[in-house]
Image (cartoon, rainbow, N blue to C red):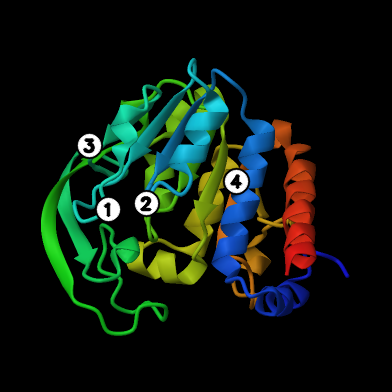
Amino acid sequence: MAYWDYACFWSLAKTVGKTPGEIFESIIEEFYKSYIHDGDTVIDAGYYRGRHTLPLAKVVGKTGSVIAIDANPRIPLLDLEALQNVDVISAALSDANGSASFFVALGAEAYSGLKKAENSKKLGHVEFEEIAVPTITLDSVAKIAKFLKLDLEGGELHAIEGGVNLICRSRPIIAFEFNRQYAAQLYHYTKEHFFETFRGLNYDLYDVFGRVITPQSWDRPLVPWYAFGVPHEQRFTSRLVRRCARRVLKNCTVNS
Protein backbone atom coordinates (compact mmCIF):
# COMPACT_ATOMS: atom_id res chain seq x y z
CA MET A 1 0.00 0.00 0.00
CA ALA A 2 1.21 3.50 -0.79
CA TYR A 3 1.12 5.17 2.61
CA TRP A 4 0.22 8.54 1.11
CA ASP A 5 -2.72 7.30 -1.00
CA TYR A 6 -5.62 9.39 0.30
CA ALA A 7 -8.36 6.75 0.19
CA CYS A 8 -6.09 4.13 1.81
CA PHE A 9 -5.10 6.62 4.48
CA TRP A 10 -8.66 7.38 5.57
CA SER A 11 -9.36 3.66 5.79
CA LEU A 12 -6.17 3.13 7.77
CA ALA A 13 -7.01 5.92 10.24
CA LYS A 14 -10.35 4.29 10.98
CA THR A 15 -8.75 0.87 11.37
CA VAL A 16 -6.09 1.97 13.87
CA GLY A 17 -8.55 4.01 15.94
CA LYS A 18 -6.96 7.41 15.40
CA THR A 19 -8.51 10.52 13.94
CA PRO A 20 -6.94 11.83 10.74
CA GLY A 21 -6.09 15.03 12.62
CA GLU A 22 -4.09 13.12 15.22
CA ILE A 23 -2.08 11.42 12.50
CA PHE A 24 -1.48 14.70 10.63
CA GLU A 25 -0.23 16.32 13.85
CA SER A 26 2.09 13.37 14.48
CA ILE A 27 3.57 13.69 10.98
CA ILE A 28 4.23 17.39 11.53
CA GLU A 29 5.93 16.61 14.85
CA GLU A 30 8.00 13.83 13.29
CA PHE A 31 9.08 16.28 10.60
CA TYR A 32 10.26 19.09 12.84
CA LYS A 33 12.04 16.69 15.16
CA SER A 34 14.06 15.64 12.13
CA TYR A 35 14.48 19.10 10.64
CA ILE A 36 15.00 21.51 13.54
CA HIS A 37 18.21 21.64 15.55
CA ASP A 38 19.47 22.99 18.83
CA GLY A 39 19.67 26.78 18.74
CA ASP A 40 16.99 27.35 16.07
CA THR A 41 14.15 29.87 16.33
CA VAL A 42 10.64 28.61 15.53
CA ILE A 43 7.13 30.08 15.68
CA ASP A 44 4.03 28.23 16.88
CA ALA A 45 1.02 30.38 15.97
CA GLY A 46 -2.28 29.13 17.30
CA TYR A 47 -0.56 27.08 19.99
CA TYR A 48 -3.82 26.31 21.88
CA ARG A 49 -2.98 23.51 24.34
CA GLY A 50 0.73 23.50 23.50
CA ARG A 51 0.48 20.33 21.38
CA HIS A 52 3.54 21.45 19.42
CA THR A 53 4.93 24.20 21.66
CA LEU A 54 6.31 21.81 24.26
CA PRO A 55 8.04 19.37 21.87
CA LEU A 56 9.35 22.32 19.85
CA ALA A 57 10.88 23.76 23.02
CA LYS A 58 12.71 20.48 23.62
CA VAL A 59 13.97 20.31 20.04
CA VAL A 60 15.42 23.85 19.92
CA GLY A 61 17.11 23.38 23.29
CA LYS A 62 18.25 25.98 25.78
CA THR A 63 19.98 28.07 23.12
CA GLY A 64 16.97 28.11 20.81
CA SER A 65 13.70 29.98 20.95
CA VAL A 66 10.01 29.20 20.49
CA ILE A 67 7.64 32.10 19.90
CA ALA A 68 4.15 30.90 20.89
CA ILE A 69 1.24 33.05 19.70
CA ASP A 70 -2.47 32.76 20.52
CA ALA A 71 -5.20 35.34 21.09
CA ASN A 72 -7.74 33.12 22.79
CA PRO A 73 -8.10 34.06 26.48
CA ARG A 74 -10.09 30.89 27.17
CA ILE A 75 -7.41 28.36 26.25
CA PRO A 76 -6.20 26.20 29.13
CA LEU A 77 -3.46 27.86 31.10
CA LEU A 78 -0.08 26.38 30.33
CA ASP A 79 3.11 27.02 32.21
CA LEU A 80 4.88 27.89 28.97
CA GLU A 81 6.45 31.02 30.37
CA ALA A 82 8.28 28.87 32.90
CA LEU A 83 10.23 27.49 29.96
CA GLN A 84 13.14 29.82 29.46
CA ASN A 85 13.19 29.28 25.71
CA VAL A 86 9.48 30.03 25.07
CA ASP A 87 8.12 33.55 24.52
CA VAL A 88 4.32 33.71 24.80
CA ILE A 89 2.46 36.43 22.89
CA SER A 90 -1.26 36.99 23.52
CA ALA A 91 -2.39 38.36 20.17
CA ALA A 92 -3.87 37.26 16.86
CA LEU A 93 -1.49 36.76 13.96
CA SER A 94 -2.66 38.65 10.88
CA ASP A 95 -1.48 40.74 7.93
CA ALA A 96 -1.33 44.02 9.90
CA ASN A 97 -0.54 45.26 13.40
CA GLY A 98 -3.51 46.78 15.19
CA SER A 99 -6.66 45.36 16.76
CA ALA A 100 -9.62 43.29 15.59
CA SER A 101 -12.61 41.28 16.72
CA PHE A 102 -11.83 37.72 17.73
CA PHE A 103 -14.57 35.10 17.90
CA VAL A 104 -14.26 32.57 20.70
CA ALA A 105 -16.11 29.33 19.97
CA LEU A 106 -17.61 28.51 23.37
CA GLY A 107 -17.07 24.89 24.26
CA ALA A 108 -15.03 24.37 21.09
CA GLU A 109 -12.20 26.82 21.67
CA ALA A 110 -9.89 25.22 19.11
CA TYR A 111 -12.12 26.69 16.38
CA SER A 112 -11.80 30.29 17.57
CA GLY A 113 -10.37 32.90 15.24
CA LEU A 114 -10.56 36.29 13.60
CA LYS A 115 -13.59 35.13 11.62
CA LYS A 116 -16.69 33.44 12.97
CA ALA A 117 -16.57 29.83 11.83
CA GLU A 118 -20.34 29.45 11.67
CA ASN A 119 -20.40 27.27 8.58
CA SER A 120 -17.78 24.75 9.65
CA LYS A 121 -19.07 21.19 9.23
CA LYS A 122 -16.84 20.13 12.12
CA LEU A 123 -18.56 22.44 14.61
CA GLY A 124 -22.28 22.03 14.26
CA HIS A 125 -24.17 24.54 16.37
CA VAL A 126 -21.98 26.55 18.72
CA GLU A 127 -22.18 29.95 20.37
CA PHE A 128 -19.50 32.59 19.81
CA GLU A 129 -18.21 35.32 22.09
CA GLU A 130 -16.83 38.37 20.27
CA ILE A 131 -13.89 40.07 21.98
CA ALA A 132 -11.32 42.69 20.95
CA VAL A 133 -7.71 41.50 20.62
CA PRO A 134 -4.45 42.99 19.39
CA THR A 135 -3.24 41.80 15.99
CA ILE A 136 0.41 41.37 15.08
CA THR A 137 2.40 40.28 12.04
CA LEU A 138 5.12 37.70 11.67
CA ASP A 139 7.43 40.50 10.53
CA SER A 140 6.87 42.33 13.82
CA VAL A 141 7.63 39.38 16.11
CA ALA A 142 10.77 37.85 14.59
CA LYS A 143 13.69 38.63 12.31
CA ILE A 144 14.61 34.99 11.74
CA ALA A 145 12.85 31.64 11.98
CA LYS A 146 13.63 28.19 10.64
CA PHE A 147 10.14 26.75 11.03
CA LEU A 148 6.61 28.15 11.25
CA LYS A 149 3.55 26.23 12.41
CA LEU A 150 0.33 28.09 11.63
CA ASP A 151 -3.02 26.78 12.85
CA LEU A 152 -5.28 29.83 12.65
CA GLU A 153 -8.65 28.45 11.60
CA GLY A 154 -8.47 29.88 8.10
CA GLY A 155 -6.26 32.89 8.78
CA GLU A 156 -3.01 31.25 7.67
CA LEU A 157 -2.70 33.03 4.32
CA HIS A 158 -3.16 36.47 5.89
CA ALA A 159 -0.52 35.59 8.49
CA ILE A 160 1.89 34.60 5.72
CA GLU A 161 1.20 37.89 3.92
CA GLY A 162 2.15 39.66 7.14
CA GLY A 163 5.47 37.85 7.21
CA VAL A 164 6.85 38.39 3.72
CA ASN A 165 10.07 40.01 4.97
CA LEU A 166 10.69 37.24 7.50
CA ILE A 167 9.93 34.55 4.94
CA CYS A 168 12.13 36.08 2.24
CA ARG A 169 14.98 36.56 4.72
CA SER A 170 14.89 33.22 6.57
CA ARG A 171 13.20 30.87 4.08
CA PRO A 172 11.50 28.79 6.80
CA ILE A 173 9.53 25.62 6.27
CA ILE A 174 5.87 26.46 6.92
CA ALA A 175 3.48 23.82 8.26
CA PHE A 176 -0.03 25.22 8.08
CA GLU A 177 -3.68 24.32 8.20
CA PHE A 178 -4.97 24.00 4.64
CA ASN A 179 -8.74 24.32 4.54
CA ARG A 180 -8.89 25.33 0.87
CA GLN A 181 -12.23 26.76 -0.24
CA TYR A 182 -13.63 26.98 3.29
CA ALA A 183 -10.77 29.23 4.43
CA ALA A 184 -10.89 31.22 1.19
CA GLN A 185 -14.56 32.02 1.67
CA LEU A 186 -14.16 32.79 5.35
CA TYR A 187 -11.22 35.17 4.78
CA HIS A 188 -12.36 36.53 1.41
CA TYR A 189 -9.62 35.46 -0.97
CA THR A 190 -9.56 33.30 -4.07
CA LYS A 191 -7.82 30.09 -5.05
CA GLU A 192 -5.84 32.11 -7.60
CA HIS A 193 -4.65 34.55 -4.93
CA PHE A 194 -3.64 31.69 -2.64
CA PHE A 195 -1.36 30.07 -5.22
CA GLU A 196 -0.06 33.41 -6.52
CA THR A 197 1.08 34.28 -2.99
CA PHE A 198 3.22 31.16 -2.71
CA ARG A 199 4.53 31.51 -6.26
CA GLY A 200 5.55 35.08 -5.45
CA LEU A 201 7.52 33.80 -2.46
CA ASN A 202 9.03 31.02 -4.63
CA TYR A 203 7.55 28.33 -2.39
CA ASP A 204 6.33 24.87 -3.39
CA LEU A 205 3.38 23.26 -1.63
CA TYR A 206 3.09 19.69 -0.37
CA ASP A 207 0.53 17.84 1.69
CA VAL A 208 1.52 16.01 4.88
CA PHE A 209 2.37 12.93 2.82
CA GLY A 210 4.81 14.85 0.63
CA ARG A 211 2.56 15.01 -2.42
CA VAL A 212 2.70 18.19 -4.51
CA ILE A 213 -0.28 20.51 -4.07
CA THR A 214 -1.41 22.24 -7.26
CA PRO A 215 -4.48 24.31 -8.16
CA GLN A 216 -6.02 21.05 -9.32
CA SER A 217 -5.74 19.74 -5.74
CA TRP A 218 -8.06 22.49 -4.49
CA ASP A 219 -11.31 20.64 -5.20
CA ARG A 220 -10.00 17.11 -4.87
CA PRO A 221 -11.78 15.04 -2.19
CA LEU A 222 -9.99 13.65 0.88
CA VAL A 223 -7.01 16.04 0.63
CA PRO A 224 -5.44 16.43 4.13
CA TRP A 225 -6.15 19.71 5.87
CA TYR A 226 -2.50 20.34 6.72
CA ALA A 227 0.20 21.31 4.24
CA PHE A 228 3.87 22.26 4.05
CA GLY A 229 5.19 25.34 2.29
CA VAL A 230 8.77 24.65 1.18
CA PRO A 231 11.19 27.13 -0.42
CA HIS A 232 11.78 25.99 -3.98
CA GLU A 233 15.53 25.85 -3.38
CA GLN A 234 14.85 23.37 -0.52
CA ARG A 235 12.37 21.24 -2.46
CA PHE A 236 14.38 18.13 -1.60
CA THR A 237 12.89 18.57 1.89
CA SER A 238 9.68 17.04 0.54
CA ARG A 239 11.54 13.70 0.70
CA LEU A 240 11.88 14.17 4.45
CA VAL A 241 8.14 14.84 4.67
CA ARG A 242 7.47 11.55 2.88
CA ARG A 243 9.86 9.63 5.14
CA CYS A 244 8.24 11.10 8.25
CA ALA A 245 4.77 10.20 6.99
CA ARG A 246 5.90 6.62 6.35
CA ARG A 247 7.37 6.31 9.85
CA VAL A 248 4.24 7.64 11.54
CA LEU A 249 1.86 5.49 9.52
CA LYS A 250 4.02 2.41 10.02
CA ASN A 251 4.01 3.02 13.79
CA CYS A 252 0.24 3.37 13.69
CA THR A 253 -0.15 -0.06 12.08
CA VAL A 254 2.41 -1.70 14.38
CA ASN A 255 0.83 -0.31 17.56
CA SER A 256 -2.81 -0.83 16.60
Could you tell me the amino acid type at mark 4? Glu
Could you tell me the amino acid type at mark 3? Asn
Could you tell me the amino acid type at mark 2? Arg
Q: CA distance from mark 2 to mark 3?
A: 24 Å
Q: Are marks 2 and 3 in contact (CB under 8 Å)?
A: no
Q: Position of residue 94 (x, y in %)?
A: 31, 45
Q: Which residue is mark 1?
A: 76
Residue 204 seen in the figure: no
Q: Is 175 on the left or on the right of 132, as rendered?
A: right
Q: Is residue 71 above or below residue 170?
A: below
Residue 200 seen in the figure: yes
Q: Which residue is mark 4?
A: 29
Q: Nearer the viewer, mark 2 or mark 3?
A: 2
Q: Which residue is mark 2?
A: 49
Binning the other alpha carbons within 10 Å of mark 1 as few (below 14), some (14 to 19) or many (20 upward) gives: few
Q: Are marks 3 and 4 in contact (CB under 8 Å)?
A: no
Could you tell me the amino acid type at mark 1? Pro
Q: CA distance from mark 4 to mark 2?
A: 15 Å
Query: Image quadrant for the N terminus?
Result: bottom right
Who comes first in sequence, dot 1 or dot 3?
A: 1
Q: Which residue is mark 3?
A: 97
| Element on which disc 2 rests | loop
Q: Are marks 4 and 1 in contact (CB under 8 Å)?
A: no
Q: Residue at x 79, y 48 (%)?
A: 243
Q: Nearer the viewer, mark 3 or mark 4?
A: 4
Q: Are marks 1 and 3 in contact (CB under 8 Å)?
A: no
Q: Position of residue 161 (x, y in %)?
A: 40, 42
Q: CA distance from mark 4 to mark 1?
A: 21 Å
Q: CA distance from mark 3 to mark 4?
A: 29 Å
User: Which residue extends farthest right?
Assistant: 1
